[in-house]
């Protein structure tokens, strides 16, 4: 199918100045042309009038958890868990996110279901269950159960948040198993976490040797490792092992930010979950004793963002939204706009995230030859970035050249 998006202002994701009154021609699942003003020559295909709107690339969330919909002992039936996961996929697409990287939870089967058109959702790059050490972040076994107790480890084949493993050999086996189940990259935990019961944020987790085993397995499959990392001890271990990307980076210092830049490692901050954690904790089923662990996290993450920016670290964008109804995904872009330049926030959630996902040749910018993932928003996102937090203002969503949402 061929059609034209005609008349909108284009913010193409590259960081270039907005281009007024632009025509974008889509042919099949690719962008065939980007033209100023009215199209040259004869009209190609149907015309979609987007006059007065702003066109952008399909948004990318580099830190999702579609499959983390229940916490603690609230074990919903498998059918309910599946329905919530599918609903979260749909909500992401409605918010303008045509691609996500799921960094802990869903197996490759969910990505396949979306690709086959069985459920509505964004293109998904799943990490499968997070590789974690016994007693570390991601290990939600009962505290007095035997190590690697199966209780609480999700529903393999649908969602499994954590995969405890210890020692290089176990890490290597776990990595191979996760890749077998459809992971497109690996996720490890190199520090303690907020939603954890047996560790502290200050803890470093996995040895360098264990992390090297994960990196080696990823490299053997032409992919990479990203790491849950709040503290510099964990980040330093990850850098020594060859970890390519770090999530959160909450307590960076200047020298570690510089080391990340020198290594070419990426950072994906996650502000949205921090901003709404307290108000959503009960809905998500988070125990009351966990909520105080979030104190001071947003301020610390904002300081780390500044250090990373000053050091020249390439910084992506991830929401880390959890729970059964993940409807605030665009808040991440709005917060990043508050903390810096709105254009930088948009580029982080488009072109930079595409680079982090190793898909920069395919998605992230509206340009000829790229995949036909385009959205139109009601308003100017460079002066009103809060619109990303309101899915009703994302009035048109096109994924792979197909209109999947149209509120015009």
Image: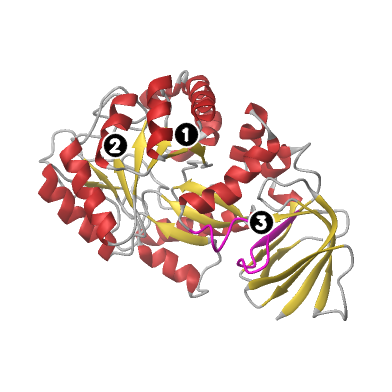
Q: Secondary structure at mark 2?
A: helix
Residue 56: give x, y in percent of width and height. Answer: 71, 54
Q: Which residue is mark 1?
A: 282
Residue 67: give x, y in percent of width and height. Answer: 41, 52
Q: Earlier in the sequence, mark 2 or mark 1?
A: 2
Q: Earlier in the sequence, mark 1 or mark 3?
A: 3
Instruction: Give the quarter of the image for residue 46.
Output: bottom right
Q: Main secondary structure of the magenta part?
A: loop
Comparing marks 1 and 3, which lies closer to the viewer?
3
Quarter occupied by the C terminus: bottom right
Q: Above or below — where is 282 with respect to 13?
A: above
The answer to whether marks 2 and 1 mark residues whose Cβ atoms lie closer than 8 Å is no
Q: Which residue is mark 3?
A: 57
Residue 276 falls left or right of residue 226: right
Q: Which residue is mark 2?
A: 238
Residue 115 falls left or right of residue 25: left
Residue displayed at 68% across by 62% down: 367
């Amino acid at each position: 199918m061929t059609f034209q998006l005609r008349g909108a202002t284009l913010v193409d994701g590259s960081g270039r100045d907005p281009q007024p009154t632009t025509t974008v021609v889509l042919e099949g699942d690719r962008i065939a042309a980007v033209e100023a003003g009215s199209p040259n020559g004869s009209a190609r295909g149907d015309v979609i009038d987007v006059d007065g709107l702003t066109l952008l690339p399909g948004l990318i969330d580099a830190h999702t958890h579609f499959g983390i919909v229940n916490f603690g002992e609230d074990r919903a039936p498998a059918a309910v868990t599946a329905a919530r996961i599918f609903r979260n996929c749909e909500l992401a697409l409605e918010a303008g996110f045509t691609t996500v990287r799921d960094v802990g939870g869903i197996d490759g089967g969910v990505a396949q279901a979306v690709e086959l058109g069985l459920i509505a959702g964004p293109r998904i790059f799943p990490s499968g269950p997070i590789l974690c050490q016994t007693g570390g972040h991601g290990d939600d076994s009962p505290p007095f159960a035997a190590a690697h107790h199966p209780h609480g480890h999700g529903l393999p084949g649908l969602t499994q948040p954590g995969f405890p493993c210890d020692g290089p050999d176990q890490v290597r086996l776990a990595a191979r198993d996760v890749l077998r189940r459809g992971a497109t990259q690996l996720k490890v935990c190199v520090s303690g976490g907020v939603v954890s019961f047996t560790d502290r944020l200050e803890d470093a987790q996995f040895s360098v040797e264990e992390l090297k085993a994960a990196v080696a397995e990823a490299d053997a499959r032409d992919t990479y490792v990203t790491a849950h990392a709040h503290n510099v001890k964990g980040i330093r271990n990850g850098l020594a092992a060859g970890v390519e990307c770090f999530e959160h980076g909450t307590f960076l210092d200047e020298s570690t930010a510089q080391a990340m830049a020198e290594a070419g490692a990426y950072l994906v901050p996650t502000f949205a979950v921090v901003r709404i954690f307290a108000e959503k904790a009960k809905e998500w089923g988070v125990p009351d004793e966990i909520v105080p662990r979030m104190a001071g996290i947003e301020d610390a993450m904002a300081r780390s963002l500044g250090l990373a920016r000053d050091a020249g670290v390439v910084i992506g964008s991830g929401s880390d939204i959890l729970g059964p109804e993940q409807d605030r995904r665009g808040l991440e872009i709005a917060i990043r706009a508050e903390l810096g330049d709105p254009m930088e926030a948009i580029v982080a959630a488009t072109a930079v995230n595409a680079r982090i996902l190793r898909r920069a040749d395919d998605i992230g910018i509206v340009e000829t030859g790229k995949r036909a993932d385009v959205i139109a928003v009601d308003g100017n996102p460079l002066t009103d970035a809060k619109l990303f937090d309101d899915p009703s203002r994302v009035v048109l969503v096109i994924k792979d050249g197909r209109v999947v949402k149209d509120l015009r």
